[in-house]
Image: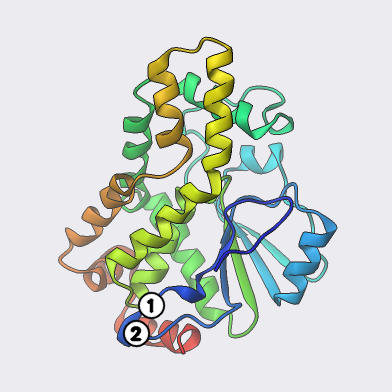
Amino acid sequence: MEIKFQGAINARDLCDIPCIDGRKIKKGRIVRSSNLSCITDSDKEILKKYGLKRIVDFRTEAEVEGAPDKEIEGVVWTFNPIIRALTLGITKKEGTFKRELKEIFLDFTIELGKDAPEWLSDLYAPLVSDEFSLSHYRNFLDILKENREGCVLYHCSAGKDRVGVGTMLILLLLGAKYDDIISDYLITNNSYQATIDEAIALGKERNVDPEILAAIGPVNGVDKRYLKRAYDIIMSYGSPEAFFKIALDIDEKYIEDFRSNYLE
Protein backbone atom coordinates (compact mmCIF):
# COMPACT_ATOMS: atom_id res chain seq x y z
CA MET A 1 0.00 0.00 0.00
CA GLU A 2 1.53 3.31 -1.11
CA ILE A 3 2.24 5.96 1.50
CA LYS A 4 2.38 9.43 -0.01
CA PHE A 5 5.00 11.70 1.50
CA GLN A 6 5.98 15.18 0.38
CA GLY A 7 9.68 14.63 1.06
CA ALA A 8 10.29 10.92 0.43
CA ILE A 9 9.65 8.65 -2.55
CA ASN A 10 8.85 4.98 -3.01
CA ALA A 11 7.26 4.47 0.40
CA ARG A 12 4.79 1.69 1.04
CA ASP A 13 3.34 -0.56 3.70
CA LEU A 14 3.89 -4.25 2.99
CA CYS A 15 0.40 -5.11 4.20
CA ASP A 16 -1.06 -5.81 0.74
CA ILE A 17 1.28 -8.69 -0.10
CA PRO A 18 -0.12 -12.24 0.27
CA CYS A 19 2.03 -14.57 2.35
CA ILE A 20 1.78 -18.16 3.59
CA ASP A 21 -1.73 -19.66 3.42
CA GLY A 22 -2.99 -16.43 1.85
CA ARG A 23 -2.45 -14.51 5.08
CA LYS A 24 -1.49 -10.82 4.92
CA ILE A 25 1.00 -8.72 6.85
CA LYS A 26 -0.65 -6.64 9.56
CA LYS A 27 -1.21 -3.07 8.45
CA GLY A 28 1.08 -0.46 9.94
CA ARG A 29 3.85 -2.82 11.03
CA ILE A 30 6.47 -2.85 8.24
CA VAL A 31 7.16 0.08 5.91
CA ARG A 32 9.83 0.45 3.20
CA SER A 33 10.96 3.82 1.89
CA SER A 34 13.66 5.98 0.37
CA ASN A 35 15.74 8.08 2.77
CA LEU A 36 14.06 10.55 5.12
CA SER A 37 16.47 13.47 4.75
CA CYS A 38 13.86 15.72 3.11
CA ILE A 39 10.65 14.76 4.89
CA THR A 40 8.36 17.59 5.95
CA ASP A 41 6.55 18.23 9.21
CA SER A 42 3.45 16.88 7.50
CA ASP A 43 5.31 13.66 6.67
CA LYS A 44 6.41 13.36 10.29
CA GLU A 45 2.80 13.61 11.40
CA ILE A 46 1.83 10.82 9.01
CA LEU A 47 4.52 8.62 10.50
CA LYS A 48 3.51 9.44 14.07
CA LYS A 49 -0.10 8.53 13.29
CA TYR A 50 1.21 5.36 11.70
CA GLY A 51 2.68 4.37 15.04
CA LEU A 52 6.31 4.54 13.90
CA LYS A 53 8.65 3.17 16.57
CA ARG A 54 11.94 2.64 14.78
CA ILE A 55 13.82 3.63 11.62
CA VAL A 56 16.50 1.28 10.29
CA ASP A 57 18.93 3.01 7.93
CA PHE A 58 20.68 0.69 5.45
CA ARG A 59 22.98 3.41 4.05
CA THR A 60 26.73 3.72 4.42
CA GLU A 61 28.26 6.23 6.81
CA ALA A 62 29.12 8.57 3.92
CA GLU A 63 25.52 8.50 2.65
CA VAL A 64 24.17 9.26 6.10
CA GLU A 65 26.59 12.14 6.59
CA GLY A 66 25.63 13.57 3.19
CA ALA A 67 21.90 13.42 3.79
CA PRO A 68 20.99 12.60 7.41
CA ASP A 69 17.44 11.55 8.20
CA LYS A 70 15.27 14.16 9.87
CA GLU A 71 14.76 13.41 13.53
CA ILE A 72 11.29 12.34 14.62
CA GLU A 73 10.45 12.73 18.29
CA GLY A 74 9.98 9.43 20.07
CA VAL A 75 11.35 7.34 17.18
CA VAL A 76 14.56 5.31 17.51
CA TRP A 77 16.97 5.61 14.56
CA THR A 78 19.30 2.64 13.96
CA PHE A 79 22.37 2.71 11.72
CA ASN A 80 22.58 -0.67 10.00
CA PRO A 81 24.67 -0.41 6.79
CA ILE A 82 24.14 -3.28 4.36
CA ILE A 83 27.31 -2.64 2.35
CA ARG A 84 30.74 -1.39 3.32
CA ALA A 85 31.58 2.18 2.40
CA LEU A 86 33.87 1.10 -0.45
CA THR A 87 31.65 -1.61 -1.91
CA LEU A 88 29.60 0.83 -3.97
CA GLY A 89 32.62 2.15 -5.84
CA ILE A 90 30.95 5.45 -6.66
CA THR A 91 32.51 8.81 -5.84
CA LYS A 92 29.84 11.20 -4.61
CA LYS A 93 30.28 14.63 -6.09
CA GLU A 94 30.20 17.65 -3.84
CA GLY A 95 26.67 18.95 -3.43
CA THR A 96 25.04 15.75 -4.71
CA PHE A 97 22.30 15.81 -2.12
CA LYS A 98 21.46 19.47 -2.75
CA ARG A 99 20.67 19.07 -6.44
CA GLU A 100 17.49 18.06 -8.18
CA LEU A 101 16.83 14.35 -8.34
CA LYS A 102 16.80 14.32 -12.15
CA GLU A 103 20.36 15.71 -12.15
CA ILE A 104 21.46 13.07 -9.66
CA PHE A 105 19.95 10.32 -11.84
CA LEU A 106 21.68 11.64 -14.95
CA ASP A 107 25.08 12.21 -13.34
CA PHE A 108 24.99 8.84 -11.60
CA THR A 109 24.39 7.07 -14.91
CA ILE A 110 27.07 9.09 -16.70
CA GLU A 111 29.58 8.24 -13.98
CA LEU A 112 28.84 4.52 -14.27
CA GLY A 113 28.81 4.54 -18.07
CA LYS A 114 26.77 2.62 -20.64
CA ASP A 115 27.42 -0.68 -18.85
CA ALA A 116 25.74 0.67 -15.72
CA PRO A 117 22.85 -1.86 -15.76
CA GLU A 118 25.33 -4.75 -15.64
CA TRP A 119 27.18 -3.05 -12.77
CA LEU A 120 23.95 -2.65 -10.84
CA SER A 121 22.95 -6.25 -11.47
CA ASP A 122 26.33 -7.36 -10.13
CA LEU A 123 25.62 -5.44 -6.92
CA TYR A 124 22.82 -7.81 -5.94
CA ALA A 125 24.71 -11.08 -5.58
CA PRO A 126 27.01 -9.89 -2.75
CA LEU A 127 23.99 -8.67 -0.80
CA VAL A 128 23.09 -12.28 -0.05
CA SER A 129 26.59 -13.78 -0.04
CA ASP A 130 28.96 -11.24 1.55
CA GLU A 131 29.44 -11.84 5.27
CA PHE A 132 29.10 -8.14 6.10
CA SER A 133 25.81 -7.79 4.23
CA LEU A 134 24.39 -11.01 5.64
CA SER A 135 25.22 -10.06 9.22
CA HIS A 136 23.50 -6.69 8.88
CA TYR A 137 20.43 -8.17 7.22
CA ARG A 138 20.28 -10.58 10.16
CA ASN A 139 20.49 -7.60 12.54
CA PHE A 140 17.60 -6.01 10.69
CA LEU A 141 15.45 -9.14 10.82
CA ASP A 142 16.16 -9.43 14.55
CA ILE A 143 14.96 -5.86 15.06
CA LEU A 144 11.74 -6.69 13.24
CA LYS A 145 11.27 -9.92 15.17
CA GLU A 146 11.66 -8.21 18.53
CA ASN A 147 9.31 -5.34 17.66
CA ARG A 148 5.98 -6.58 18.99
CA GLU A 149 3.85 -3.51 18.30
CA GLY A 150 3.96 -0.35 16.23
CA CYS A 151 5.79 0.22 12.97
CA VAL A 152 9.37 -0.29 11.75
CA LEU A 153 10.43 1.73 8.69
CA TYR A 154 13.58 0.72 6.81
CA HIS A 155 15.31 2.49 3.96
CA CYS A 156 18.50 2.98 1.97
CA SER A 157 18.98 5.98 -0.34
CA ALA A 158 16.42 5.32 -3.06
CA GLY A 159 14.61 2.46 -1.33
CA LYS A 160 15.07 0.05 -4.21
CA ASP A 161 18.22 -2.13 -4.18
CA ARG A 162 19.32 -2.79 -0.59
CA VAL A 163 15.73 -2.30 0.48
CA GLY A 164 14.57 -4.52 -2.39
CA VAL A 165 16.69 -7.43 -1.18
CA GLY A 166 15.75 -6.76 2.45
CA THR A 167 12.09 -6.84 1.49
CA MET A 168 12.57 -10.13 -0.32
CA LEU A 169 14.11 -11.63 2.83
CA ILE A 170 11.16 -10.46 4.92
CA LEU A 171 8.64 -11.83 2.45
CA LEU A 172 10.40 -15.17 2.09
CA LEU A 173 10.39 -15.49 5.88
CA LEU A 174 6.66 -14.83 5.78
CA GLY A 175 6.07 -17.42 3.08
CA ALA A 176 5.31 -15.10 0.15
CA LYS A 177 5.54 -16.46 -3.39
CA TYR A 178 8.35 -15.25 -5.63
CA ASP A 179 5.94 -13.74 -8.17
CA ASP A 180 4.35 -11.59 -5.45
CA ILE A 181 7.79 -10.52 -4.23
CA ILE A 182 8.71 -9.44 -7.75
CA SER A 183 5.42 -7.57 -8.15
CA ASP A 184 6.14 -5.47 -5.07
CA TYR A 185 9.74 -4.91 -6.17
CA LEU A 186 8.67 -3.56 -9.57
CA ILE A 187 6.33 -0.96 -8.03
CA THR A 188 9.50 1.09 -7.56
CA ASN A 189 9.49 1.84 -11.29
CA ASN A 190 6.14 3.60 -10.94
CA SER A 191 7.56 5.72 -8.13
CA TYR A 192 10.56 6.90 -10.14
CA GLN A 193 9.32 6.92 -13.73
CA ALA A 194 8.53 10.64 -13.85
CA THR A 195 12.01 11.54 -12.58
CA ILE A 196 13.64 9.08 -14.97
CA ASP A 197 11.79 10.75 -17.87
CA GLU A 198 12.98 14.15 -16.65
CA ALA A 199 16.58 12.88 -16.42
CA ILE A 200 16.41 11.54 -19.98
CA ALA A 201 15.05 14.87 -21.23
CA LEU A 202 17.82 16.71 -19.39
CA GLY A 203 20.39 14.39 -20.92
CA LYS A 204 19.07 15.09 -24.40
CA GLU A 205 19.39 18.82 -23.75
CA ARG A 206 23.03 18.25 -22.81
CA ASN A 207 23.70 16.00 -25.83
CA VAL A 208 24.52 13.00 -23.67
CA ASP A 209 25.42 9.77 -25.48
CA PRO A 210 22.20 7.88 -26.41
CA GLU A 211 23.58 4.68 -24.85
CA ILE A 212 23.88 6.53 -21.55
CA LEU A 213 20.33 7.86 -21.92
CA ALA A 214 19.09 4.31 -22.49
CA ALA A 215 20.72 3.22 -19.22
CA ILE A 216 19.07 5.90 -17.05
CA GLY A 217 15.90 3.86 -16.57
CA PRO A 218 17.51 0.50 -15.72
CA VAL A 219 19.99 2.15 -13.34
CA ASN A 220 17.62 4.43 -11.44
CA GLY A 221 14.66 2.07 -11.49
CA VAL A 222 14.62 -1.70 -10.99
CA ASP A 223 14.63 -4.76 -13.23
CA LYS A 224 13.39 -8.19 -12.16
CA ARG A 225 16.67 -9.65 -13.45
CA TYR A 226 18.51 -7.77 -10.69
CA LEU A 227 16.52 -9.28 -7.83
CA LYS A 228 16.68 -12.70 -9.47
CA ARG A 229 20.48 -12.59 -9.11
CA ALA A 230 19.98 -12.55 -5.35
CA TYR A 231 17.08 -15.00 -5.41
CA ASP A 232 19.07 -17.55 -7.41
CA ILE A 233 21.80 -17.50 -4.78
CA ILE A 234 19.21 -18.03 -2.05
CA MET A 235 17.71 -20.96 -3.95
CA SER A 236 21.15 -22.47 -4.54
CA TYR A 237 20.87 -23.59 -0.90
CA GLY A 238 17.89 -25.71 -1.94
CA SER A 239 15.13 -23.61 -0.42
CA PRO A 240 14.62 -20.26 1.34
CA GLU A 241 14.45 -22.13 4.67
CA ALA A 242 17.84 -23.75 4.01
CA PHE A 243 19.32 -20.35 3.13
CA PHE A 244 17.98 -18.82 6.33
CA LYS A 245 19.36 -21.71 8.39
CA ILE A 246 22.81 -21.89 6.82
CA ALA A 247 23.51 -18.27 5.83
CA LEU A 248 21.65 -16.41 8.59
CA ASP A 249 21.40 -19.00 11.40
CA ILE A 250 17.61 -18.65 11.44
CA ASP A 251 15.75 -21.80 12.49
CA GLU A 252 12.13 -22.94 12.25
CA LYS A 253 11.24 -21.50 15.66
CA TYR A 254 12.52 -18.08 14.59
CA ILE A 255 10.41 -18.25 11.42
CA GLU A 256 7.31 -19.32 13.37
CA ASP A 257 7.75 -16.43 15.83
CA PHE A 258 8.31 -13.97 12.98
CA ARG A 259 5.16 -15.09 11.22
CA SER A 260 3.12 -15.03 14.41
CA ASN A 261 4.23 -11.44 15.04
CA TYR A 262 3.42 -10.06 11.59
CA LEU A 263 0.73 -12.14 9.88
CA GLU A 264 -3.01 -12.08 10.32
Q: Position of residue 107 (x, y in %)?
A: 56, 22
**Residue 211 x %, y %:** 37, 18
In this view, the residue in front, 66 or 208, is 208
Residue 233 appears in which quarter of the rendering?
Answer: bottom left
The spot of residue 35 in percent (x, y) is 64, 50
Q: Is residue 244 left or right of residue 133?
A: left
User: Is residue 66 visible in this depiction of the protein?
Assistant: yes
Asked if residue 214 is positioned above or below residue 82 in the image, the reply reads: above
The reply to whether discs 1 and 2 touch (Cβ–Cβ < 8 Å) is yes
Location of residue 74 with respect to 81 vertically, above or below? below
Q: Which residue is located at x 42 percent, y 50 percent?
A: 132
Q: Work out how far the residue at label 1 is from the one at label 2, CA to CA, in angstroms.
A: 5 Å
Callout 1 crowding tier (Cα within 10 Å): few <14, some 14–19, many ≥20? some
With respect to residue 69, does 201 lie above or below? above
| Amino acid of disc 1 | Pro
Identify the residue at image location x=30%, y=46%: 125
Is residue 160 in view? no
Secondary structure at badge 2 equals helix
Left of 66 or right of it: where is 178? left
- Examine the rendered structure and indicate whether residue 193 appears above or below residue 3: above
- The one nearer the camera, 209 or 231, is 209
Name the kind of residue labelled 2 in the image: Gly
Judge left or right: residue 201 versus residue 186: right
- 27 lies left or right of 47: left
Asked which secondary structure carries label 1, the reply is loop
Q: Which mark is residue 195?
A: none
Graded by Cα atoms within 10 Å as few (under 14), some (14 to 19) or many (20 or more), the crowding at tag 2 reads few
Tell me the number on the disc at residue 22: 2
Residue corresponding to mark 1 = 18
Q: Residue at x 70, y 75 (%)?
A: 50
Q: Position of residue 119 (x, y in %)?
A: 35, 31
Asked which quadrant contains residue 43, the reply is: bottom right
